[in-house]
Amino acid sequence: MLRELHVRNLAVLAEASVAFGDGLNVLSGETGAGKSIVVDSLFLLAGARASADLIRAGAETLTVTGVFAPAGSGWRRVLAAAGLDGAGAPGGDDAPAAAAAPDGLIAAGASGDEVLVRREVGRNGRNRVFVNDQPTTLRLLADLAPHLLRIHGQRDEMELLAADLQREWLDASGGEEAARLLARAAEAHGRHARLAERLARLSGDERLRLERVDLLRFQAGEIDAARPRAGEDAELRQERELLRHAEAIARALGTAFSLLLDEEGAAAERVARSQALLAGVGGWEPQAASWAAELEEARIRLTETATALGRRLDGLEADPARLDAVEERLALLERLCRRHGGDLAQVLARRAEMEAELAELEGDAGNQEELEENAAAALADYREAALALSAARRGWGEALAGRIEGELKDLGLARARLAVRLDRRRRAGSPLVVDGEAVDFGPRGIDQVTLLFAPNPGEEARPLARIASGGELSRLHLALQLAAGSGAGPGPAAGPGAGSGPGAGPEGAVRPTLVFDEIDAGIGGAEAAALGRKLQRLAGGGQILAVTHLPQVASHADVHFRVRKTVAAGRTTVQVEKLPPRGRVEEVARMLAGDGLTALSLSHAEELIAGAARQPRAARGGARRPAPA
């Protein structure tokens, strides 16, 4: 979830700090109050490109900071791959302090289970990204963002039109069966691809094959001649430092030995004298004996340490010949690392790969017939797996379409129809033949998935890209989230990047924060109340941020924020405030009846909020509800 958001100098928003809660977080305000600015700040945290035009007039830099508590473990892998997971990361002893917001909302650093993201955009065009207060790239943020938040709005629903993403949603609705069938198809595809590659090499230019064999033998021989050990380079670097600084180490050890034991008035001698003095007054001072015993223990430890220093000093001497040998060996190992891998472990792994490739190149030449049989068998296994996956997808498609239609009935699309179509793409020369046609194929099967939509009776169901409006797409996206089933849905890794793909499905799933930007456009009345219930349900066990202008939606909020625009001293500013119970009633009443609050509008607002709070807990996914005003 998104715990905290701090924005400074974005458009007309001078400064705002917001602490979000779990469940459904609603942002409301009059038209033009600046709700879109809050969403724009989230887009920046999601990796969207920024322009100096976003900076508030008179300011030089805009800053957006968010503290996230992500679910799952995918975000940790992204940080680890970028070298941002470990020493210096938030929560560690060396964690750098984050720049605190003026009101203290953004804490110094973040805990080990949190991620702190900061974007800075300068008027000079400089754009900086920080993750856990460590500078990084916009590309890294785009990779990380899908694990943190997903933004859905009429301007960002076009990804739902992507064929690959539609296929992923369909597969996600298949649950464990889909995971099993996809894994089987991917494994068979990989096995066939490896065998086909070996056959292609064998069928190619014999001269190129022999040149490849010679190169691999040379490289393997170079590694074998060096006889490297994993970790040897690190050991040699440590020894090199010891040899380079042998004189300084000897001086330090010798001086320490003298101060502790060897010279007149050494530490051990002084401790022994102190012990004798205490022993002499033991008859009069009750604690003298215990102090003397402690000093005796200290004298023994000092003597042992000094003796160890002396032994090490006796065996330590400058050895230029050994230093030269270490330098030469390190130079050899570093050359191997530059040519074959980043460290010796990778060099040794590459040596094993060479051995395997040589065995294939040399063994395949006399075994082409067997190789062809194995490739054909692997392709047959893949064909069987792909057809089983296609058959299952047809069943999942019918079930998913029915569930989506059920969700759409409450969202102003009661008579809409949805269907899932599976197609296969022909590919000339493909080794895979299905129903007499050579078809394209890959690790995820042979199907192209298309969602077909008919918003009104009597209309032909056509692909979403050709018929659905922005408002319909927005509601379809919500219905798909709810209908994917039992927490299914494409995870962050399946999203299109930049944090605006679909999250996992509904209740119980590992998913990022979902942001819905004015998904309620074009609906009202009972449909609006149904939308509020659905958002409330989807938020169960997770977090949703929804920008809305409908009181029926706002009444279902777990946390309600009001965005207001004010003008003071000739400057326009935007404020974001978390509403207390009474303020929430007044805001819902304003949404119902405008600025002129009346007893009737306040009573109606209280009724709406109380009715939303009385929704059965199971229908809300277990989300906590604030007490009604």
Image (cartoon, rainbow, N blue to C red):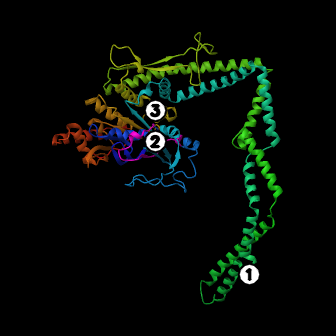
Q: CA distance from mark 3 to mark 2?
A: 28 Å
Q: CA distance from mark 1 to mark 3?
A: 76 Å
Q: Is residue 614 visible?
A: no
Of residues 148 and 616, the one drawn nearer to the viewer in this rendering: 148
Q: CA distance from mark 2 to mark 1?
A: 68 Å
Q: Check disc 3 and give the amino acid type.
A: Gly
Quadrant into which the N terminus falls: top left
Q: Residues within 10 Å of mark 2 (few under 14, many from 20)?
A: few
- From this view, report whether residue 240 is shown above or below residue 170: below
Mark 2: secondary structure: loop
Of residues 180 and 462, the one drawn nearer to the viewer in this rendering: 462
Determine which residue is flagged by label 1: 264
Of residues 247 and 553, the one drawn nearer to the viewer in this rendering: 247
User: Is 341 inside the magenta-drawn segment?
Assistant: no
User: Is 70 inside the magenta-drawn segment?
Assistant: yes
Stretch in magenta = 48-75
Q: How many marks?
A: 3
Residue shown at the point (57%, 44%) measured from the top left: 80
Name the image quarter holding residue 467: top left
Determine which residue is flagged by label 2: 125
Residue 211's x, y, as percent? 79, 26
- Give the left or right position of residue 92, taking residue 476 as reference: right
- Give the left or right position of residue 224, taking residue 587 as reference: right
Determine which residue is flagged by label 3: 501
Q: Check disc 2 and give the amino acid type.
A: Gly
Q: Earlier in the sequence, mark 2 or mark 1?
A: 2
Mark 3: secondary structure: loop
Q: Residues within 10 Å of mark 3 (few under 14, many from 20)?
A: many
Residue shown at the point (55%, 22%) measured from the top left: 389
